[in-house]
């Protein structure tokens, strides 16, 4: 028996055109659902806010089902078990899973994974051990196929995935150039993440020239979170046999007119490989990746700046911030301690 | 001693903007050069006219040195040996090599390869055993990584590389859709090459919809010779885990304003792999590819339509035709019998 009666939820109210924000969501409250066999009642601690969520609320996201109007918004997060009818899960245990935007979800075992707190704290499991960190790890090592000594370019480098992607490349002995918006983020890239170069896309009219200026002959691997003009500027600077890991396209997700990339022809002579990927394709390799990330985290060589908003009701505003660049670090909503 | 005195040549006179044609070249005649040690004097039989040649005469082709103004135009072809100071090459032997646009080149052994006439005739070595056929073979099998049952789309499918690429996919048990310009080329694709579907890009305003209409759920492998809008239309129709072999971009080579591809973001959720390539990257695998092509040729299952122009002086005009789509088949200039 729990003392909690209400499960606060945030529901999708309308499909946005362009930016998503509070106007597209509605708050609601329903009685908590007592767990049936194989289920647990949870108290949400952190809910992750990710760019992919903007895609999930479109009519046809393509690779996952769309979130339906009137449904709880889909989201991953970390929660504490309040009541459990799942073997091996006890009250007080921490789990991660597809919580949705709700304070007290009741979920089946298949949607949950018990956290190994020997690897990191609950916050670490939202940040450098979470899904965005795994995305960075596989995108850089497998898709980007980085090699020691490579020159590696990361767009959205102060963001959730970009921070980790850049650090993975540094830790694997690459020279790393980060792209971010504004002097504060660029200072963070150089000082906190020790990147070799940081480019402020907001302060240049010619990003391709700015990359050329620091790329020392060209880019071997480009990890792209941004798309559009940034992708075009990177293609211009790729070395022969360069690899481009297409992870995100945050500049294009809400753009009214998509940007046309004009220099794909360069990919022929340069033998560029561009590869789109989704982290869940690597599901069977998560544990070795997490072990590596946890080791670097424990040694102090890996870090992640989080941007935490307080309160479930902030989630829609958080989703908007991702696309205006107002967040500074991996964005999450803190719901309970 | 040879009875030939003059080597007719065609030199690059000016770098074109847009289409290249006769106005950018000049005819010349020089005395034939007697072969030194390790060289042979040749009589050119066929010279291949390929889209890449338009790139070679730009200021900065990127992957090969530029042809200099006043130099003999670079080209591959098939020739007969007139005099030889190369071990293993005798007068009357046929060779292929980097002949250039000239009637009687004198070339070193490193630029030549003796033809194995057990695999095919001199014309076959220009066509289905030549470099454009190898390009098709490696692009389809290695870069495109076709599998039996795949739905495969080929742009420029009536062209030199496209014809072979489409047939390689058919022979490897794929369902093949060809794109070409005009009803004659489309009829050829279906009747002579036995492709499953042929799309006339000139008769549709919406190529993406036309592809969707025949793709039966999507494209697994796209072999692209065209770039631009055609590439965009194909991306729209790719299946999850689809592969795109970027071989050429003939629509873009001479376009005054390059076309911007707007839907690269789809590559993320669809996990599309796009890979540019150059046939010479596969140089150490040419012999097994040629053996396969020769076997299919001998069995009558592989064919190639050639478009032969008569006379060295037609070469510049041939180069122009490639980019207006006036050629119908693999284009070559016949110089001698």
Image (spheres, coloured by chain):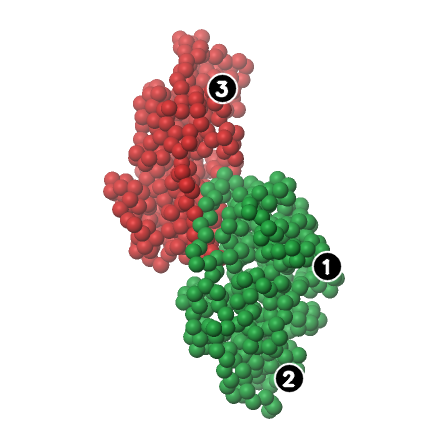
Chain colours: A red, B green
Give the chain of mark 3: A
Tell me the quadrant of the picture where the C terminus of chain B can be found. Answer: bottom right
Instruction: Single out the mark in the foreground, 3 or 2.
Output: 2
In the rendered image, residue B198, in percent from the top left (x then y), is placed at: 65, 51
User: Who is closer to the viewer here, A79 or B97?
Assistant: B97
Left or right, B216 with respect to B299, comes to left
Tell me the quadrant of the picture where the N terminus of chain B can be found. Answer: bottom right
Which label's residue is closer to the chain start, 2 or 1?
2
User: Who is closer to the viewer here, A7 or A207?
Assistant: A207
Binning the other alpha carbons within 10 Å of mark 3 as few (below 14), some (14 to 19) or many (20 upward) gives many
Instruction: Single out the mark in the foreground, 2 or 1.
Output: 1
Rounded to the nearest angstrom, the CA distance separating label 1 from label 3 is 59 Å
Binning the other alpha carbons within 10 Å of mark 1 as few (below 14), some (14 to 19) or many (20 upward) gives some
Give the chain of mark 2: B
Left or right, A183 with respect to B176, comes to left
In this view, A157 is above or below A81 = below
Q: In the image, what residue occupies the spot 40% across and 22% down?
A: A25
Res. A62 in view: yes
In this view, B253 is above or below A81 = below
Binning the other alpha carbons within 10 Å of mark 2 as few (below 14), some (14 to 19) or many (20 upward) gives some
Q: Does the CB distance between marks 3 and 2 fall below 8 Å?
A: no
Instruction: Single out the mark in the foreground, 1 or 3.
Output: 1
In the rendered image, residue A178, in percent from the top left (x then y), is placed at: 33, 46
The residue to which callout 3 is attached is A107
> Hey, which quadrant is residue B237 in on the image?
top right
In the rendered image, residue A332, in percent from the top left (x then y), is placed at: 35, 28
The residue to which callout 1 is attached is B301
Q: Does the CB distance between marks 2 and 1 fall below 8 Å?
A: no
> Hey, which quadrant is residue B98 in on the image?
bottom right
Question: Which label belongs to residue B91?
Answer: 2
């Amino acid at each position: 028996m729990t003392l909690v009666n209400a499960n606060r939820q945030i529901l999708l109210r309308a499909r946005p055109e362009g930016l998503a924000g509070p106007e597209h969501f509605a708050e609601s409250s329903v009685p908590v659902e007592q767990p049936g066999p194989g289920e647990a009642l949870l108290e949400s601690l952190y809910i992750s806010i990710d760019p992919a969520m903007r895609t999930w609320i479109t009519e046809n996201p393509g690779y996952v089902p769309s979130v339906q109007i009137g449904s709880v918004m889909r989201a991953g997060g970390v929660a504490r078990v309040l009541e459990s009818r799942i073997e091996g899960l006890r009250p007080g245990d921490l789990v991660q899973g597809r919580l949705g935007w709700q304070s007290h979800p009741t979920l089946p075992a298949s949607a949950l994974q018990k956290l190994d707190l020997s690897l990191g704290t609950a916050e670490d499991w939202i940040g450098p051990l979470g899904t965005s960190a795994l995305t960075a790890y596989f995108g850089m090592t497998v898709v980007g196929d980085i090699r020691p000594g490579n020159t590696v370019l990361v767009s959205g480098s102060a963001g959730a995935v970009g921070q980790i992607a850049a650090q993975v490349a540094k830790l694997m002995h690459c020279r790393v150039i980060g792209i971010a918006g504004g002097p504060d983020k660029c200072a963070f890239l150089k000082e906190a993440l020790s990147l070799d170069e940081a480019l402020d896309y907001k302060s240049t009219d010619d990003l391709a020239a700015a990359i050329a200026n620091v790329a020392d002959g060209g880019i071997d691997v480009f990890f792209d979170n941004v798309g559009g003009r940034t992708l075009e500027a990177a293609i211009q600077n790729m070395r022969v046999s360069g690899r481009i890991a297409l992870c995100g396209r945050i500049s294009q997700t809400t753009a009214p007119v998509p940007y046309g990339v004009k220099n794909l022809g360069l990919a022929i002579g340069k033998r560029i490989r561009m590869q789109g990927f989704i982290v869940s394709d690597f599901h069977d390799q998560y544990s070795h990746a997490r072990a590596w990330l946890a080791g670097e985290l424990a040694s102090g060589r890996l870090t992640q700046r989080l941007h935490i908003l307080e309160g479930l009701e902030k989630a829609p505003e958080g989703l908007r911030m991702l696309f205006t660049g107002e967040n500074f670090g991996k964005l999450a909503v803190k719901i309970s301690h």
